[in-house]
Image (cartoon, grey):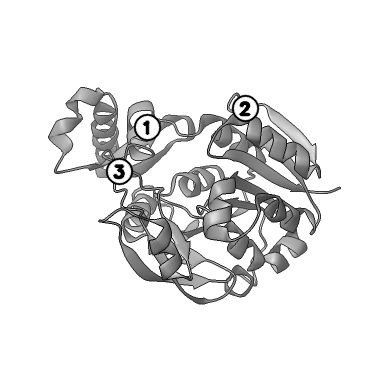
Amino acid sequence: MFKSWESKLRNLRVEMLGRVPDILLKPFANCSNVFKKITPYNFYILLNIQDKYIGRPLFMKGSYEQSISETFVKYLKPDSCVIDIGANIGYYSLLAASQCPRGKVFSFEPDNNNFNLLKTSIIYNAFEEIIQAYNFAVSDANKTIIISDLGNTSNSGARVTSENEDLLKSLISAPDAYFKKIEAVQLDTFLIENRVDIVKIDIEGHEPYAIRGMLNILKRDKPIIFAEFAPLNLKLFGGIEPSDFLKLILDIGYHISLVERSGRLLKFGRDIPAIMNYFEQQKTHHIDIIFTACN
């Protein structure tokens, strides 16, 4: 009985917050973390409404990256095992858990603020048996690396990592940017006993390091890989040409597809020049791609 009333009150509180227009967000200036129900997938997420790029859109619209979300869900099964690399506040981890009641989600997020929001959402949704969250970065070895927020506190996704602190400082000019040492793990040793079905990776250019550290998993299980492909980030923070990053994954037996904003899936096979040409035509920071195993 008490749980039923508690659930009703929680739903009412969250839905009322979800109807607040943008101009009325000012009263939340000193209390910026609120829960939002993601109705299409029936889960709640704790977000920061001062975050203009992730928290605010989720709060106002109740959705995030709709075409990617819809495509992502199509590949999930009730018992899927998902790795979320660069989980941020946990949207995709929670989305996966909501669709995989018998599955497992391994979430990796090195930023403390984002990680705390993620952990709270896991508990709020009673997903503790499904999601295992780690306050680590993912790289090519178990080691200490540097994380920076670029001095951009209004974008929780603006976190970059590197082994080289001097390199980061040479690329980041914001006077209030932070640079902190964090622990990174190599997934081939960290998750050695787990079958993997799907990987979601978005780590602002550090993707090549993470992929090199999980080549055995990719070769063994051939999971579907959802990746943000941002050529400039790959060059600056990954130390690799974008085409070489694509080749790294294609060489272990993958094809490339692309998810357009409309939700349409474009298949490029193993044609790297074609995908690079498509990116150049878009005049954008990144495109969303899917790697699937060759038949």
Sequence-first tag of 1 and 3? 1
Do the numbered discs 2 and 3 sit on residues whose CB atoms are within 8 Å?
A: no
- Disc 3 designates what residue? 154
Residues under labels 2 and 3: Cα distance? 28 Å
Q: Position of residue 121 (x, y in %)?
A: 36, 49
- Front-most of residues 192 and 240: 240
Q: Which quarter of the picture shows residue 190? A: bottom right
Q: Identify residue type, mark 1.
A: Pro
* Residue at the spot 46% in from the left edge and 62% down from the top edge: 161
Q: Is residue 153 placed above or below 116 in the rendered structure?
A: above
Q: Position of residue 133 (x, y in %)?
A: 45, 61
Residue 259 in sight in this render = no
Q: Position of residue 180 (x, y in %)?
A: 34, 68
Q: Nearer the viewer, mark 2 or mark 3?
A: 3
- Front-most of residues 240 and 115: 240
Q: Identify residue type, mark 2.
A: Gly
Residue 45 in sight in this render = yes
Crowd tier of the residue under label 1, counting other residues whose Cα lies within 10 Å: few below 14, some 14–19, many 20 or above: some
- Front-most of residues 197 and 186: 186
- Disc 2 designates what residue? 263
Q: Identify residue type, mark 3.
A: Ser
**Residue 57 numbered tag:** 1
Please tell me how many numbered marks the rendered image carries.
3
Sequence-first tag of 2 and 3? 3
* Residue at the spot 49% in from the left edge and 55% down from the top edge: 86
* Residue at the spot 42% in from the left edge and 51% down from the top edge: 88
